[in-house]
Amino acid sequence: MRIVSLVPSATEMLFALGLGPDLIAVTHECDYPPAALELPRVTRDVLPPGLSSAEIDAAVKELTLQGQSIYELDTEELHDLRPDLIVTQALCSVCAVSYDDVRAIAQEIETRPRVLSLDPHTVGEVLGDARTLAEATDRRDAAVELVRDAAARIDRVRLAVRGARRPRVAALEWLDPPFAAGHWVPQLIDFAGGEDVLGFAGENSEQRSWEEVISSQPDVVVVMPCGYDAQIAYREAEMHRDELRALGAGEVVAVNAAAYFSRPGPRIVDGLELLASIIHPELVPEASGEALTVEL
């Protein structure tokens, strides 16, 4: 099967299901696993480089209001690749090429590829996407194993923090302006033994004011700017040191959102373990991933 992935999380899921050899192209943001970097790119970023967080937010909002995507699809290359399956999403206009655009283009490709949209809002739906992809690619056994392993790891974390105090946690998906992380992140915080004071499980991420964030009185602040790694998240936090200091939290940490939180793929379980080690280091002392403490 010839598969094109237009979403980084789908690329990760396809590789996790053993479908790496079937992938023939990915997006310009697909950087995991390393083998994905060797595949042709069929998308490009519309936004110019070097924009600040505020400028990115303004540009994204303007394009979204105009019904445009922040990504461009190389339609000529996609035609030449002759895929059988295109995996995309309609959950977030910021995260991928427009689903409607992909469907329209697919109808013009000679092979008439199937277009599969993955749009999870919860942890369960993320794992359900593994089954959806498996059904479309005949990898059911691989999906069963992947979901079983993920569920076991989730259960281990939940068992480890059972009965422990539940610190108040603010997860910030953007800082200028501040956005409360939504979708699966509030669930991950709950599973990790915390209380999300800003986001709602299964709901969209929401813009908040700094006054609202202050009034939430968090004990722990997790800075996870969408699509950024821990080092960039740390720099963003430093640029907003005064606002973060005003929250009065006992701990502020910057994490790799691109790897563990922004993308609804297999690594959100790593994100859960990382959150548990941040919220309850005495109960979950070790986890993969980087958490950089921001000194205020």
Image (cartoon, grey):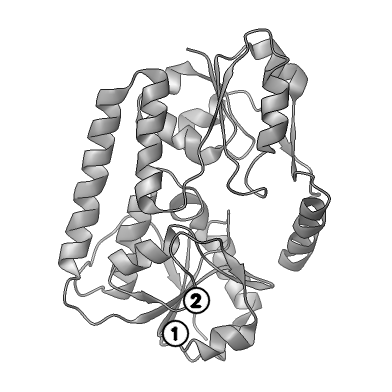
Residue 185 in sight here: yes
Rendering coords of residue 66 (x, y %): 84, 50
Asked which secondary structure carries label 1, the reply is loop
| Chain-order first, disc 2 or disc 1 | 2
Q: Tell me the residue at 56%/83% (across/down).
A: 213
Callout 2 amino acid: Leu
Name of the residue lying farthest toward the top: 110
Q: Tell me the crowding category of disc 1: few under 14, some 14 to 19, or many 20 or more residues within 10 angstroms, Cα based.
A: many
Q: What separation in Å lies between label 2 and label 1 (alpha carbons)?
A: 9 Å
Rendering coords of residue 283 (x, y %): 19, 71
Viewer-nearest of discs 2 and 1: 2
Q: Tell me the residue at 49%/86% (across/down).
A: 216
Q: Tell me the residue at 62%/33% (across/down).
A: 27
Rendering coords of residue 7 (x, y %): 56, 37
Q: Picture quarter containing residue 111?
A: top right
Rendering coords of residue 168 (x, y %): 38, 82
Q: Tell me the residue at 17%/71% (across/down).
A: 162
Q: Picture quarter containing residue 156?
A: bottom left
Q: Picture quarter containing residue 278?
A: bottom left
- Compared across the picture, whether 243 is left or right of 142 comes to right
Q: Which residue is the site of mark 2?
A: 198
Residue 31 in sight here: no
As drawn, 274 above or below 24: below
Q: Which residue is the site of mark 1?
A: 218
- Compared across the picture, whether 101 is left or right of 172 comes to right
Callout 2–callout 1 Cβ contact below 8 Å:
yes
> Looking at the image, which is closer to me, 40 or 126?
126
As drawn, 120 above or below 103: below
